[in-house]
Amino acid sequence: MSDNVACAGRVSRLRALMEQRGYDAVILRNNPDLRWLTGAEGVFDDEVAHTALVTPEGLWLHTDSRYFNSFVEHLGDDTPWQLDMEVVAPAAWAACRVAEARARVVAIEDTCDLAFYDALRHEFGQASIAPALPRLHGDICDLRMVKDEAELELLREAQRITDESFEHICGYIKVGMTEQQIRAELENYMLSHGADGLSFDTIIASGPNGANPHARPGERKVCAGDLIVMDYGALYHDYHADMTRTVCLGQPSDEQMKVYEVVRQAHEACADAVAPDVIGSDIHDLSVRVISEAGYGDYYGHGLGHGVGIEIHERPGFGRGWNKPVPAGSVVTIEPGIYLPGKFGIRLEDCGVVSERGYEPFTAASHELRVIPV
């Protein structure tokens, strides 16, 4: 059931933005934004099938018969949203609502497709209205950066399932198993122990495959002495977990241990440096300095971390491109890595919240290199 108190707070934040900008209404079609505002879990999929209109006084949501009953079930009887499954094109529905609301300045997401935008302008003409159409340039994504307590609770539970799955898979892996076998067991465990789905396609990358940060699991059999990079997460009530641990099948070599410690030092130095409103790219640059000073700068090319929530990658981030403050309440990953082609890769990732006390990881698994007996 939707958390109406939490969702009312989210709508209030959007309406405060509307008042500040002088918007009479906002038209929304982006599913993650609609999930955040409505709180309707387990309804949204990959189809852009819903249209919402938000005004200072009203909340309207148009969908179709495939989703209507699910919205009724998940929103509950006391929802402030007026649901509609009239068989009409989304643009025509939106134009009718705008005309009824007498809205003169109607903001629209810049993520909407051009066909919808053109159809909307046509429908405005048919209705003899001509509202201004300013763009929302990720404004709701920015609002979503700061998580409320209801969201943090879901994110913590998603991570709890993910951590539990790590403990299970470490007891499962044996020499001779394929990456695909390990992946199947890990995903099955998450799905049978509380996950509603997977946050993303699981990465299981062993030996030299670990040098590819986004390697796809294959038929390679894990061997004694392999490092195995496992990047995965559980989806829980539409909220994502994200975690990477690198384990060693048997005792690590001196080189493997040396590189692992560099990655660990980079991770922990960055976590210690996080504070409310820190500049995200500054934290990334710190990870680069630590890894470069150890002699591995050429083998670390990706960003340090990204926001996590309703989407697996969202704002803000600890990457070279996020040169803005990271506000308290943001949930962000920290995931430095070193990737040595032809040898192995190592990544260590936690997911946590930026609080007034600093970085508080949801991830419970230790930063010690886990050695799996052979």
Image (tube, helix red, strand yellow):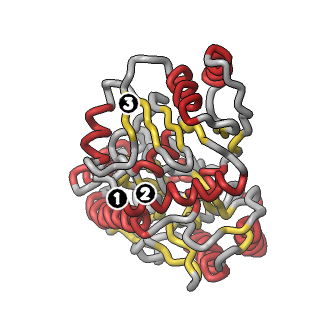
For the question of whether residue 343 can be seen, the reply is no
Q: Secondary structure at mark 1?
A: loop
Q: Nearer the viewer, mark 3 or mark 2?
A: 3
| Left or right: 174, with 349 as reference point | left
User: Sequence order check: which comes first, mark 3 or mark 2?
Assistant: 2
Q: Residue at x 43, y 31 (%)?
A: 62
The residue identified by callout 2 is: 7
How many residues crowd mark 2 within 10 Å: few (<14), some (14–19), many (20+)? many
Q: Is residue 148 left or right of residue 234?
A: right
Q: According to the image, label 1 marks what residue?
A: 3
* Circle 2: residue type: Cys
Residue 95 in sight from this viewpoint: yes
Residue 240's place in the image compared with 102, above or below, is: below
The image position of residue 252, as x and y in percent, is 48, 70
* Residue on which disc 3 sits: 84
Spatial CA distance of label 1 from label 3 is 21 Å
Judge by depth and name the residue closer to the eye, 335 or 347: 335
Position in image of residue 369 (x %, y %)? 46, 73
Circles 2 and 1: CB atoms closer than 8 Å: yes
